[in-house]
Image (cartoon, helix red, strand yellow):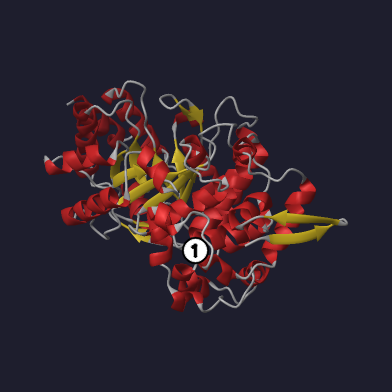
């Protein structure tokens, strides 16, 4: 179906839905690289006007990637809940934006419609929203998950303690874990990106994390972010695994480039559930995504990168994950050129994921060859904190020495919790207080910095 819009005495034509969505997207370098971006600001405005007039029902009749060609498209169609959709089915995209911003869109109302929204609907409405709109609606979407603690509660913000090391050195990783815990980081997960996918090295890390968490009875969970098949092998051989991780995307072809499919993820989910390791819940999966991955894999089908990203969230939703985060600036300036584009993308991703019912975190990050700096990340971090992000990353000095990119530090988590009055997960907060790391007011205590926990931890790692 074609779409038209008249702007400044010019008529603009958009051949189909995926073209309309791409042309309406705020400027980003990845869409320019793919050749799908609007040719001018005028064309972008025309596309946004046409998109605002489009009925939400249309998204059920025209797919951006054909049902027969893509298993993610099949998942979107087959899992759609018409009853949940009925609440907003009479609206256009523009009307939907207005409803989301209204007092009628309460947290309870937003929860009721989740299963009735397709990722393309959610991506579409985000394209005609201002930054403040994305923040306002996202902060109304509370998504709570549980494994060894409770994440996503209002008034709380968690962190992934990310103790990466360029050679997977146990002592170096342990030092980063200790440092992070002493700054109150790690309630979302203690998650390591291994330097290699070597089975022996990976399982050594899994065992070390399990020993630390078990010995100190830390109410958190561990994850080694190796390929899902390696994690399955480890589970089958009795290696302790809490949360199963995999990078995912919004098209079948991109997921195949990652070496996964829905059937592989189904197996991983069922296997992780069967372990019954969670003490307070059974959300057992962790996913990472990022705008530009489909273009990198040459599997975007002419769909803009933000819509592809939103489609990944329906893949994640199938598995009721404990955590999902968009690694927003990691792929590089080819996809998000500068701080302005990274900030916008991070807020879009968080909004889309939350609206679809996911426990969204954001890796607030950039690569050193992007036109961005830590001031841009401070802006995005603060906006996401206001928007109710479930978790962020915590890395020593904001500098990941293994992955070679810049993200948020242990101190950044303290900043955003302090300025917005947020706490770690409640179980984790109590543990921090019991270990004299936090004082009763939620601030770092001096005893924790120099006390018995630090000495005991160092002794345990040396053993």
Instruction: Point out the image quarter for the N terminus.
Output: bottom right
Kindly identify the residue that appears in the image at 17 percent across and 56 percent down: 274
Task: Please state if 390 lies on the left or on the right of 237 as rendered.
Answer: right
Q: Mark 1 points at which residue?
A: 118
Kindly identify the residue that appears in the image at 58 percent across and 47 percent down: 304
Kindly identify the residue that appears in the image at 34 percent across and 43 percent down: 246
Instruction: Point out the image quarter for the C terminus.
Output: top left
Spot the residue most to the right. 9
Task: Please state if 11 lies on the left or on the right of 59 as rendered.
Answer: right
Q: Position of residue 182 (x, y in %)?
A: 38, 37
User: Looking at the rendering, which quadrant does residue 15 occupy?
Assistant: bottom right
Near mark 1 (Cα within 10 A), the count class, few <14, some 14-19 or many ≥20, is many
Q: Where is residue 229 in the image (x, y as percent from the top left)?
A: 24, 40
Which structural element holds mark 1? loop
Q: Where is residue 66 in the image (x, y as percent from the top left)?
A: 47, 56
Residue 359 seen in render: no
Q: Where is residue 9 in the image (x, y as percent from the top left)?
A: 88, 57
Q: How many labels does the image show?
A: 1
Viewer-nearest residue: 443 or 221: 221
Residue 362 seen in render: yes
Relative to 401, say whether 323 is above or below. below
User: Looking at the rendering, which quadrant does residue 185 occupy?
Assistant: top left
Spot the residue most to the left. 237
Viewer-nearest residue: 268 or 371: 268
Viewer-nearest residue: 97 or 258: 258
């Amino acid at each position: 179906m074609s779409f038209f819009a008249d702007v400044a005495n010019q008529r603009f034509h958009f051949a189909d839905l995926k073209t309309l969505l791409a042309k309406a997207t705020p400027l980003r370098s990845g869409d320019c690289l793919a050749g799908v971006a609007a040719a001018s600001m005028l064309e972008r405005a025309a596309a946004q006007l046409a998109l605002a007039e489009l009925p939400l029902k249309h998204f059920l009749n025209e797919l951006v990637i054909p049902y027969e060609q893509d298993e993610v498209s099949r998942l979107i169609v087959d899992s759609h809940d018409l009853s949940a959709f009925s609440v907003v089915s009479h609206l256009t995209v523009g009307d939907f934006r207005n409803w989301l911003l209204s007092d009628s869109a309460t947290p309870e109302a937003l929860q009721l419609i989740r299963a009735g929204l397709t990722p393309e609907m959610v991506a579409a409405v985000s394209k005609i929203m201002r930054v403040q709109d994305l923040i306002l609606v996202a902060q109304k979407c509370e998504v709570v998950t549980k494994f060894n603690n409770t994440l996503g509660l209002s008034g709380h913000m968690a962190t992934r303690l990310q103790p990466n090391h360029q050679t997977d050195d146990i002592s170096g990783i342990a030092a980063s874990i200790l440092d992070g815990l002493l700054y109150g980081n790690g309630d979302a997960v203690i998650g390591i990106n291994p330097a290699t996918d070597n089975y022996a090295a990976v399982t050594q890390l899994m065992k070390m994390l399990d020993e630390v968490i078990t010995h100190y009875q830390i109410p958190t969970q561990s994850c080694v972010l190796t390929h899902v098949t390696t994690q399955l092998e480890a589970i089958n051989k009795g290696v302790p695994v809490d949360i199963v991780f995999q990078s995912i995307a919004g098209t079948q072809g991109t997921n195949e480039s990652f070496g996964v499919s829905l059937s592989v993820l189904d197996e991983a989910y069922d296997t992780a559930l069967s372990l019954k390791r969670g003490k307070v819940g059974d959300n057992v999966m962790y996913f990472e995504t990022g705008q530009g991955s489909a273009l990198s894999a040459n599997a975007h089908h002419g769909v803009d990168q933000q819509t592809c990203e939103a489609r990944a969230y329906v893949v994640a939703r199938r598995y009721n994950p404990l955590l999902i985060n968009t690694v927003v600036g990691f792929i590089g300036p080819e996809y998000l050129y500068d701080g302005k584009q990274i900030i916008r993308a991070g807020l879009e991703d968080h909004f889309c994921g939350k609206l679809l019912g996911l426990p969204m975190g954001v890796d607030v990050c950039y690569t050193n060859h992007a036109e961005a700096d830590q001031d841009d990340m401070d802006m995005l971090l603060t906006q996401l904190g206001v928007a109710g992000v479930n978790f962020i990353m915590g890395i020593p000095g904001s500098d990941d020495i293994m992955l070679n990119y810049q993200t948020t530090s242990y101190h950044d988590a303290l900043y955003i919790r302090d300025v917005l009055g947020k706490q770690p997960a409640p179980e984790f907060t109590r543990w921090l207080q019991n270990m004299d790391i936090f004082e009763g007011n939620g601030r770092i205590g001096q005893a924790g910095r120099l006390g018995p926990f630090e000495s005991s931890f160092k002794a345990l790692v040396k053993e």
